[in-house]
């Protein structure tokens, strides 16, 4: 837990320069409140929310408001900044949820999201199999039981709420994240990576210092994308209305979807 806190605090350091001084910040999916507490220490007025049943409840270090995962319990145009860290991939209604974020942001406000990358998904899948072998070897079951575990868990589980571990290679890509935000009414201000390498099955923790993980990211890819997006300066209600027409696709968009479908088919066939 201490190791994860260090990683999340370091990722937050990449976000801080983009936050307006003395702004009102909402953190979505705040977990234990590590990052919310750092933001407060830096002089921001912070509210933090999360859904009930978070695995970090026992480690809370900052007041976190429980909400239903759909409606943010705040008035319209209440915040200057909305921040999330490795949260949006766990929202099954991710496109509709953008409307809620837009609603609580002031006109000209900023949303900053730290999001898993395609390279994180790839290396997490790779790391899954040594982890599976370890679990099978330590299993109390006999040979038949161990073979059953291997057969039923031969594919790495998905991380988010949509698709599977194969489709996440596409949906976690920088291109896919930007496509999502643009079609839901955002103007992209800045995108960059966290310049850290880690996986969802990290067993090294402190054995690999963060400075080593930084340099590894140049070779193996960064584990997260960071997207800073602005509310257009027009009336927010106008943006909401435009979202209702987001299902209309251009020929260029259709071509991109076909390209991604072909890539996905190739990935699945290679694992057949």
Image: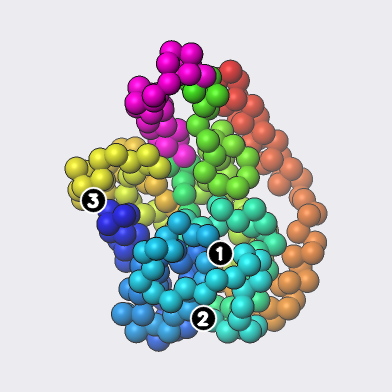
Q: Which residue is mark 1?
A: 51
Which residue appears farthest toward the top when viewing the image? 143
Q: Earlier in the sequence, mark 3 or mark 2?
A: 2
* Residue that badge 3 annotates: 210
- Provide the secondary structure element on which disc 3 rests: helix
Give the x, y percent position of residue 200.
Answer: 40, 42
Q: Visible in this render: residue 188?
A: no
Mark 1 or 3, which is nearer the eye? Answer: 1
Residue in view at x 62 percent, y 74 percent: 72
* Segment colored magenta: 121-148
Position of residue 149 relative to residue 164, above or below, is above
To which residue does mark 2 refer? Answer: 80
Badge 1: residue crowd in 10 Å (few <14, some 14–19, many ≥20): some
How many residues crowd around disc 3 within 10 Å: few (fewer than 14), some, or many (20 or more)? some
Q: Is residue 2 magenta?
A: no
Q: Which element carries disc 2, helix, strand or loop?
A: strand
Tell whether label 3 touches label 1 (CB within 8 Å): no
Instruction: Specify which label sits upstream in the sequence, 2 or 1.
Output: 1
Residue 77, by quadrant, is bottom right
Pinpoint residue 108: horizontal percent, then vertical percent.
Answer: 57, 79
Specify whether residue 136 is painted magenta: yes
Q: Disc 2 and disc 1: Cα gap in Å?
A: 22 Å
């Amino acid at each position: 837990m201490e190791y994860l806190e260090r990683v999340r605090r370091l990722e937050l350091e990449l976000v801080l320069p983009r936050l307006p001084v003395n702004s009102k910040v909402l953190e979505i999916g705040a977990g234990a409140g590590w990052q919310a507490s750092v933001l407060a220490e830096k002089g921001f007025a912070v509210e933090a929310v999360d859904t009930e049943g978070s695995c970090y409840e026992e480690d809370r270090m900052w007041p976190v408001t429980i909400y239903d995962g759909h409606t943010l319990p705040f008035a319209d145009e209440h915040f200057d900044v909305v921040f999330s860290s490795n949260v949006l991939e766990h929202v099954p209604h991710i496109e509709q949820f953008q409307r809620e974020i837009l609603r609580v942001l002031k006109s000209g406000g900023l949303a900053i999201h730290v999001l898993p990358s395609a390279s994180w998904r790839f290396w997490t899948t790779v790391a899954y199999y040594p982890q599976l072998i370890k679990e099978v070897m330590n299993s109390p079951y006999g040979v038949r039981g161990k073979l059953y575990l291997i057969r039923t868990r031969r594919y790495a589980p998905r991380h988010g709420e949509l698709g599977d571990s194969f489709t996440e290679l596409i949906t976690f890509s920088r291109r896919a994240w930007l496509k999502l935000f643009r079609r839901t009414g955002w103007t992209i201000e800045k995108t960059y990576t966290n310049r850290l390498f880690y996986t969802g099955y990290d067993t090294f923790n402190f054995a690999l210092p963060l400075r080593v993980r930084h340099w590894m990211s140049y070779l193996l890819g960064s584990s997260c994308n960071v997207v800073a997006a602005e509310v257009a300066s027009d009336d927010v209600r106008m943006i909401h209305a435009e979202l209702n027409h987001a299902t209309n696709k251009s020929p260029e968009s259709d071509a991109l979807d076909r390209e991604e479908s072909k890539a996905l088919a190739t990935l699945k066939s290679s694992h057949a």
